[in-house]
Amino acid sequence: MTTAPDVPAPAPRRRLASLRRFIRSRSAVAGAVGLLVLAALALFAPLIAPFDPAAQDGEPLLGPSGAHLLGTDQLGRDILSRLIHGARASLIAAAGAAAVGAGIGVPLGLLAGYLGRWVDAVAMRLVDLLLAVPGILLALVIIVVLGPGRLNLILAIGIGAVPEFARLTRVATLGIRDRDFVLAARGMGASTPDTMVRTVLPNVLAPIVIQLVVTASMAVVVEAGLTFLGLGTPPPAPSWGGMLQDARSYLYQSPSYGLFPGLCLVATVLCLDRIGRGLQLAVSGGGPNVATRITTGGAV
Amino acid sequence: MSGGALDGVVRDGNAHSGTTPGVPDRGAGQPVLRLRDLTVEFTTSAGVVRAVDGMSYDVFGGETLGVVGETGSGKSVSVLAALGLLRTPNLRRVSGRALLGDVDLLALPEPDLRRRLGRDVAMIFQDAISALNPVQRVGHQIAEALRVHDRALSAAAARTRVVELLDMVGVPHPGTRYDQYPHQFSGGMCQRVMIAMAIANRPKVLIADEPTTALDVSVQAQILDLLRVARQETGAGVVLITHDLGVVAETADRVSVTYGGRIVEAGDVTQIFTRPRHPYTAALLGALPRLDTASDRLLPIPGQPPDPSELPPGCAFAPRCPISRGRALCTELRPEPVPDGGGAGASACHFPDEAASLLTARPDGEQAAPVDERAEPAGTRESAGAPVTAGGPAAPVLDIREAMARFPVRSGLLARPSAWVHAVDGVSLRVPAGRTLGLVGESGCGKTTLARLVLRLVEPTGGQIMVDGDDVGKAGRSQLRRIRRRAQMVFQDPYASLNPRLSVGDNVAEPLRLQGVPHGRRRLEVADLFTRVGLRPEHADRLPAQFSGGQRQRVAIARALASRPGLLILDEPVSALDVSVQAQVLNLLADLQRASAMAYLFVSHDLAVIRQVADEVAVMYLGRIVESGSVRRVYDDPRHPYTRALLASVPVPDPVGRAGRRRVPLGGDVPSPVDPPSGCRFRTRCPLAAAVCAEEEPPLRLIAGGHTACHFAEQTPGLKPAERTPALKPAEQTPGPEPAERAAGQEPEVRG
C-alpha cells in the first residue's frame, strides 16, 4: 500500500471531558455527595437508625434531647429514626417514577421521532392527552383507580412524567434523524430497529439523563404531597410526607416535629437540582455552546 | 514575544524601501488599512489559545489584498478582531493596532467605532442569506445602512439611491426587488445585495470574508466580477479572505499567506504563484488539483494544519515542511518575516530560497510514483473514448437506466403535493469495475439525490438501477441489505457522517457487526482497514471528535471499505477538507482503487477535483445529464454550452495571463426544478439558445467520442467565447417567487 501513513496523533483528549466538567462544578459535586449520603442512609437504615422507627418507646412529642436527637412524635417514636427510614420511601419513589417515565416516554418519543407519519401523530396526541391533566391530579386519579400502595404510587408519578420524556426524545430524534451518520447506518444495511437503538438512541441520551434527575426531584415532592394527602405511602410505614401530615396537628406543641421532615425534603430536592444543573453544564460544555458555560460557570 | 522582533523587521523594511515589508513601494501614499502586530487570544478548556499571533499587513486604496490560508489559520479572526466584531465570551485579549488612516480602531470607544463601521469599513460575509434580516424588506436594509450614517437623508432619496445601488450590483428589476424579502432572493442575489449594502457608503476598506465559498462556480464568477467593479467604483481597498488559491490568483494584486495564526509569506500575486519563498505556499500549490493541466498524482502536504492550542516552538510549518527535514533551526527558532531583496515581499522562513525550488522540482521528483500508476489508468483513460452511457467493455458494476426521483412540494392546510420537484429526471449512467465516473453539477442539479438513489436512501420514482445485476428498486428487505453491502457511500461532511457516540473503531466495525462478524474478528479487520487508509490501529478506541476533518474522512472511507464493496459512492468526499488534506484523501482513493478495482461514482461540484480523479465524466444540469464522455473529451473539447461555461467559470490558480483569459460567467441562477424550462433546460441561460431549443428537448447524441445533449453541439467548438456582456448584469430573470421555490426544491421533502 503506497498510502503514506498519515500522522494521526489526535490530541490525547479526554473521553471523560464531561465528567471532568461536572466535577469542576462545585455545587453539583456537593449535590451528588448529598444524594449519596442520603442513599446510604436509606440503604442501611436499620443499621444506622438509633431506634426502631415503629417502636413507641419514648414520651410523646419530646423536643430534641440527648436520647432522642430530634425528639419524638405523637406516639413516642424517634423522629430521627423515622426520618432515616423515610428516606427509603422518597428515594424509591424518585427512582421508580423516573424509571417508569423514561421507560415509557423514551421509546415512545424515539418511535414518534424516527418513524414519523402516523406513528408520530398517534404518539403525540397520546402525550397531549396526558399533558392536558395536571401532574398531581393525574397521579391522584391513577391512585384512586388503582388504590394506594407503593407500586401504584410509583406508577402514578411515573406516568405523569411520560410526556416530558416522550417530547424530549422526539425532538432530539428529529434533530439527528436526517444526519449523515444515521443515513450512513441505513446505507450499510442496518435495519430500522437497529438504527434506532444503536445509532439514534445513544445520541439523544444526554438530555434524557438530565430529565431523569429532574423527574426524580419532582417525584420526591409529589410523593410527599400524595402521602400528605393520605394517598401515598400507607401510614404505619415512615415517610416524610406522612410525618409532615402528622406534625401539622401538633404544630403548637412541638414545632420542631414538622421542621425536620420539611428540611429533609428541601435538601433532597436541592441535591437533585444541583446534580441536574451540573449534568446540563457538563453536557453542553464541550459543544459550541461556550456561552452557557461562561455565563453560568461562576455561579454553579 | 513576537512584538519586539516584528518591530525590528518593520524597521528593517523601512531601511530597505521606505515601507513595511510585503508592501510594494507605492507613490500612491498612505495605505487605507494597516494591521500592526495584531494578536488575538482565546480562553478555552485547553488553556489560552493564540489564534492570531502578530499579524501585520497593509491595504492600499484601489487594490485587492488576498489573505489566503486554511481552516484555523487566523485569517478571518484577525479581521473580525481588528474591527471589534469578535464578541465570543471567551475572547481573552486583542492587542496590536488596526489603523484606519490614522485612527486605531482597537483604541476607539464603542460609539466612535460604530460610526466608522459600515461607513469607512464594510464587511461582506460568506453566508449572505443569513447575514440579511429575514423579516425586513431587502431595500429597507440597504436604506438603513445609508441612513444610519446620514440622518439627513430623506426616505425618498434613500430609496432612489438604493434602487441605483441594486441596479449597479446587477439585481434585475431593482424597483420591484426593493420591496421583496431575502427569502425571495437566491444565494447569489443575496450576495449582490450584501455587496450593495457594503458599498452604499463608499467605504475606504471593503472586507470580503470568503464571499463566494457558499456559491456555485458560475455564480462565483459573477460575484468576483462584481467585487472588481465595486472596487473600481468606490476606490476602496479590498481585503479578500479566502481559502481558494484560484480566487486569489484571479482577483488579488497582492497576497498574504497565513498559517498557524501568522503571515508566513506576503508578496505580489505573480511572485507568490510563480516564485513562492515559503515552502507552505509552494506545497499548497502542489496539492491543488488543476483544471488546466492534469497531473497524475497530487503532492499532498503530510499531516494536518496545526492546532492553535499546541503550536510547536519553532516554525509552525516545520513538522510538515519538505525542506525543513528536521533541521534544528526550524524546530527551535520561530522564523520572523524577512523581506526579500526587492522589498516587495516577505517570507517567514529560515530558508526562503529553497522554497521556489520545491515548485520547480516537482515534476521530476514526481516521476517515480506515477510511472507505474500511469500504466494502468492511462490505458483506461485512452480507451475512455467509449461513452459512459454506451457501456464499457466489462459488465458495469453500476448501471443506471432512466432513473427518476421526484419529491412533492407540499402546501396548503392538508399538505397535499401541489407540485413536484424533478430532482433526477431520466438519467442513465454506467460505471464499470475499476473505473471512476465523475458526476459534476451545481447545487440543486440533483447529483446528490442520484447518489442516494443508488443505495435507495431516496425512493426512486422510476427507471432502473442495477448494482452488480441486482435491481435496487425492486429489491426486498434482505436483498436490499445485501446490495447495500456491495455498494457503500462516503458522505461529504466527515463531521456529520460518523456516529459521535461510537469510537472510530466501532464506527468502522458497524457494517461488520451488521453482517454478524464475531467480535474478535471484527477487531482484526478494523485494524487492517485502519492501516489501509493510513490511520493508526491503536487509535481505534478514540471518539470521532478527537480527529481532524481529513482523518475523519479516512475513518469514513475505512467504514465504507469494511464490507468489501465493489462500488463506492463518493458524495463530495473532499469538499469539506482543506486543500492540503484534500490531496491526501484523493491520493488515498486512487491507491485504494488501484489495489482493489472498485468502481467509483464520484460526485462533486469541483471540476478540478473531478478532472483529477475521474476516467469519465457526466455533467448534470437540472436533473438531467447534458454531457458525458471521457475526461479528455469533456474537458478539452466540451460541446455543451453549459460545460463550456462551467469550465470557463472556474478560477485558475495562475495569475500569469489572467488579464488575457476571457471568463464568460453564466448569467442568472439555476432555474427551479419544480418548473423546469420547456425544451432544453439550459436554454434560459444559454448564449446559443434559439427557437428550436424551447420546443424540442435535445437528446444525448454521440458527438466527437462523447455524448452531448445540445442542438448545436456540432457548431460549438468553432465558437469563440462570447464577449462578456456588461459585467455586472446577469441575464434577465423573472423576479417572481422563483428563488423561494428553488429553496424549497433544494430540500426535497421525503417524509409525510
Image (cartoon, coloured by chain):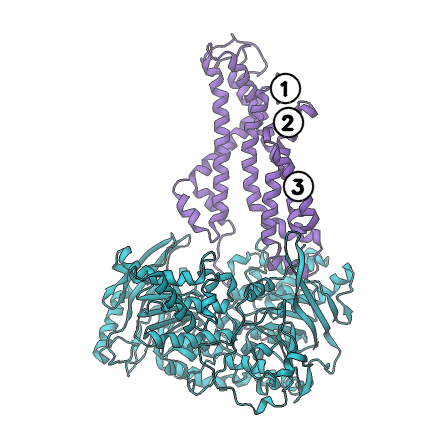
Chain colours: A purple, B cyan
Left or right of B209? Residue B733 is right
Up-down relation of residue B725 to residue A100 (above or below): below
In front: label 3 or label 2: 3
Q: Which amino acid does label 1 sit on?
A: Pro
Front residue of B691 and B340: B691
Per the image, the residue denoted by label 1 is A234
Badge 1 or badge 3: first in the primary sequence: 3
Counting residues from the N terminus, which is met first, the one under dot 1 or under dot 2? 2
Residue B616 visible somewhere in the drawing: no
Tell me the element at label 1.
loop
The numbered mark at residue A125 is: 3
Circle 3: residue type: Arg
> In this picture, is B81 found above or below B341?
above
Number of marks: 3
The chain ID associated with circle 2 is A
Q: Mark 3 lies on which chain?
A: A
- B41 displayed left or right of B439: left
